[in-house]
Amino acid sequence: MVLGIIFDWIGYRTARWLLPLVSSGAWRVEQDAGRNGGHDWKGTRRRLDAVLEFSRTISEWIGVFVWSSVFALLIVLRESVG
């Protein structure tokens, strides 16, 4: 239950906000979860407008990885200061 919330809500929303920002709009996250199809084994597909679209599942992992990296960096910085 808790992992579902973390992946579905935090990971997905982070990736939806972060990927277009980092790539200047060239990367997007799949908006409709019911349209799950056409992605390759990496969880991506190229849309007709040349935008690379990530599946919902891979975007959840990207978002969780970002937050895990932020927390790990905070722990390292905290330990190095004190």
Image (cartoon, rainbow, N blue to C red):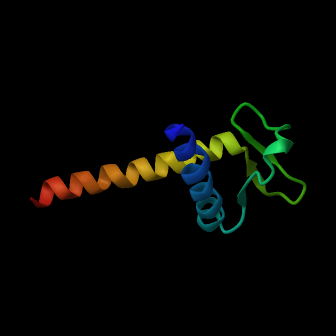
Residue depicted at 72% across the width and 57% down the height: 28
Residue depicted at 66% across the width and 64% down the height: 20
- Left or right, 23 with reference to 31: left
The C terminus: image quadrant:
bottom left
Residue depicted at 50% across the width and 46% down the height: 64
Q: Residue furthest top?
A: 41
Q: Residue furthest right?
A: 48
Q: Please say if 18 is above or below 60.
A: below
Give percent across and percent down for residue 76: 23, 52
- Left or right, 13 with reference to 30: left
Give percent across and percent down for residue 78: 19, 57
Give percent across and percent down for residue 45: 79, 44
Viewer-proximal residue among 69 and 4: 4
Give percent across and percent down for residue 58: 64, 41
The N terminus: image quadrant:
top right
Viewer-proximal residue among 62 and 52: 62
- Left or right, 69 with reference to 65: left
Residue depicted at 71% across the width and 66% down the height: 25
